[in-house]
Image: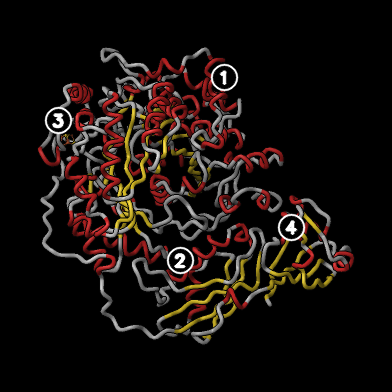
Amino acid sequence: MCNLDSILPLVRKPGRYINNEIGCRGKQPFASTDTSVVIAFPDVYEIGMSSLGVRILYHLFHKEGIRVERVFSPWVDMEEKLRSNKIPLFSLESRTSLKDFDLLAFSLQYELNYTNVLCILDLAGIPLRSQERKENDPIVVAGGTCVFNPLPVFPFFDALLIGEGEVLVPEIMPVIKDKSLTRDEKLTEMGKLPGVLSTRNIKNIEFPIKKVFTNTLSSDAIPDPPIVPFIDIIHNRLVVEIARGCTRGCRFCQAGIIYRPYRERDNKTVVEVAQQGLLKTGYDDLTLLSLSVLDHSEIEDIIRNLRGKNISPSLPSLRGDALNDEVATLVGGGSVTLAPEAGTERLRRIINKDIDEDEMIASTRRFRSFGFTHAKLYFMIGLPQETDEDIRGIVKLVDTIKRNTPVKVSISPFVPRPHTPFQWERQNNIGELSEKISFLKNSTKRVKTTYRDPKGCLLEGVFARGDEKLSNVIERAYRLGARFDEWSELFHFDRWVEAFNKEGIDPNKYLKERDVEKRLPWEIVDTGVQREWLLEERELARKSEIRRDCRITGCSGCGICNGNIIPIKDKKSTGKIQYGRGIKRTDTPPTKIRYRIMYSKTGNLRFIGHLDTTRALIKAFKRARLPIVYSQGYKPKPRIAFSPPLSLGFTSKVEYIDVILKRPVPDIRIRLKRTLPDGLTINSAEIVPLKVKSLSSSFLHQRLFVKYDSSKVDEFMKKENMEIDGINVRPAVLEIKKRTDGAEILMKFGKIKPLQLFQVLFSITEEEAKLLKVERIGWE
Ligand code: SF4
C-alpha cells in the first residue's frame, strides 16, 4: 500500500483518492492467491460513482466471491504527482498497484474518455496495446455502451464484453479464477463465451458477436449495500433502477436500441429496495431510474406507495406530453425536464419524437401550481433533414413556453450513433453547427442556454462511427497530452488536429453519409435489433412518418423480443395523492431535545472537506435511526448544526454537532459508533438546553497544533505587521505556545486562512504549508 501523505494535501479534491466509504468492500491488501478485479472508470470519481453501471458491476463481482476494487481517472494534478514520485496508479480500496490485479475491467460510457483509458494504463505501467502485454499483466477488458462499436479501441483491450454484467460477470469469472490457465489460454477461453470479443481468437470468431442480456431484472443485481461517497458526486442520492430499455423509438437514440428489450422491476420490489436503501445509506433523496420513467406500467402505484412511507422520489427523463395533471401532482416540485428535441412538428415526426406540442405547451401553464420552479428544455441541432425553419422553430417554441414558466435551454448537436435508424446519416461539420449556434445565441439572448462544443461533438461522432484506423489517432493524441476531453478547461482540440494530421486521417470523412449497401464497421456486433427494421425506420423518417411505441400499438418486429413485451397499462388513476405544500401534518408536535456531540476527525478523512463531512455525518445519523426533528416547509431539512469549518487536510479532536431529536436516545454513542465511517469518532454526547447559544456564535477562535520548528514564534509575536499577499496576518493570532514538537496557536476565525499564517510564521512556501501536520485541539 503506498503512502500518499506527501501528495494528497497538494492536489485538488483529495477526497477523490481515499477509501473506506460506507458500503465499500475490501479495505485490506489482498493475498496473492485471491482472484482480484479492479473496475476502472476513465473519468473522475464524482462521475464514475454516479454511474449505476459501475455500482452494479461492483456488486456483481463481489457476489462472485472475489476481491473487487475501484479506480477512477486521477485529475491532471494527481497524474503529475504520481509521475514525479514514480508511484504506479493504484486502486481506491487497498491502494494496490493496478498491475497486481488479475482483471482490469473498464466501464466505457463515452468516446471522449478514450485518452483517459490510455492514461490509466500508462500510469499503472501496463502496456497500452494488448499485443504488447506479458504473462504477468492483468487481463484488460471493457464493457459499456462504447463497445457496441469496438474497432477504434479494440487494440487497447484484451477482450471486450458486449452486453449486460448480470450475464457476463458470472460467465467470465470461472475463466479468470482458473489458476491453471496461462494468460493466453484464458483469453482464448473467454473468446468462446457468448458476448465476448477476444483479441486472441478474433480470426476464428463467427461474426457478428451477439449482445447478451438478462431476461429479468433480478433483485440479486441491485447494489446492496449501496456505497455512500464521502465527497459530493454528480448524482448524490439513492438510485433505484425501475426498468431497463425503452421502446418509444426515437430514431437518434442509441440507448433505446442497445438496452432493448424492455424489462421492469415490480412495484413491491422497487418500494422495498428504496426503503431499505434509504435506511442503509442515510440518503434523503431517491431517484427512480429508467430511460423513460413514466412508461413503467406501475409508476403511479410505485410513487403512491413510496409517498405512503414518507419517501418523495424524483424522476428523471419526464416526457413533455406525458406530464398530465395527475403525474404533475405526483412528482411536482423543483424543475421539470421537457425534451421536444426538435423545433417543429415536421422534424419531430422525422426523429419519431411523438410529442403533442399543444398539450406540452398547455401543461407548462400549470407548472407553477404544481410547485415546479422552471422547465429545462432539451433540443438537438443538425438533425437529418433539418432546415432553417426548424432552427427558427426552436426559438419560437422557447419563446412560447417561457411566457408560461421560466426556462433553461440546452442545445446539443446531433451525433449519428451506431445501431440506430440514423446510423447512415451525415453529421453536421463544425462550421455548420457553429453557424446554427450563433443564430440561436442571437435569438435567445434573454434565456439561459447552454451549448455543447461542436469540436467535442466532431470527435464524439468520429469515434462513435469510427473504424480500426482510429486507434493510432487516439494513442497519438494521448501522447500529445490529450486528457479529459469532455472537460472544457482541459480540452485541446489542436492536439487532436495534430494527431489526425500526423496519422494522415481526415476526421471529416467520418461525418459523411454511409452507404446502406455496405457493411458498417460496428456491424461486427449484433444488438438483437435487425438491420432491416432499422432501414425500415430510416425510410419512415424520410417520409416523416411516426412509428408508435410497440408497448402501445403492438410489435413492429425489431427482432429483440419477438413481441414478448410488457404493455403500457392504462394509467387512469384511482386514488388522489397529496404532494408537497398540500400535505398537512397530522401528527402531534414532538418533544424536542438538543444533543451536543463532540467528535474527532482523523486519518484520511482529513482530506474530506467541511460540506462533505457534514453530509457524511447526517447520513450516519440517519443510518443510526436517530429520531431527528426536521424543519417545516416545502423541503424539510434535518435540524443539525456544525461547528465552524475545519481546513482541508487538518485533523481535529474537538469538532461539534448540535442535533435536535424528538426524544432522548440513551445509547446514542453506541448507535453512532456503528454507523460512522472510520476516521470519525464520537467523544461525547450530552443533552444541552434547547435554547443554548449556537455553535457558530459560541466559537470565535480556534486552537491549532502545528508540528513544526517553533523557534521563529517569538520574533513573530513581537511584530505588529506580518504580511502575505498584502494582508497583515498578525492581528489574527492571539497567542502561541511553544512546544518541543511544534506550536499551539490560538487564532481568530475570519479572513486569514491558517495556511497563510503558517507561511509567514514559519517562513515557508504554500506547498510546504500544505504538507504540515495540523490538528485542531480546542476552541474559545
Ligand atoms: S420485438 Fe416487437 S415488441 Fe419487442 S421491442 Fe421489438 S418491436 Fe417491441
Q: Which residue is mark 1?
A: 498
Of the residues tagged 3 and 4, which is closer to the observer?
4
3D distance between C-alphas at marks 1 and 4: 43 Å
On screen, residue 225 above or below 37: below
- Mark 3 CB within 8 Å of ligand 1: yes
Q: Nearer the viewer's eye, disc 2 or disc 3?
A: 2
For label 1, being within 8 Å of ligand 1 is answered: no
- The residue carrying mark 3 is 557
Residue for point 74% across, 67% down: 732
Q: Residues within 10 Å of mark 4 (few under 14, many from 20)?
A: many
Q: Which label sits in the foreground, 1 or 4? A: 4
Say whether marks 4 and 2 touch (CB < 8 Å).
no
Amino acid type, mark 2: Lys
The residue that disc 2 covers is 619
Q: Nearer the viewer, mark 4 or mark 2?
A: 4
Q: Secondary structure at mark 1?
A: helix
Instruction: Find the distance from the CA under tag 2 to the CA under tag 1.
Output: 49 Å
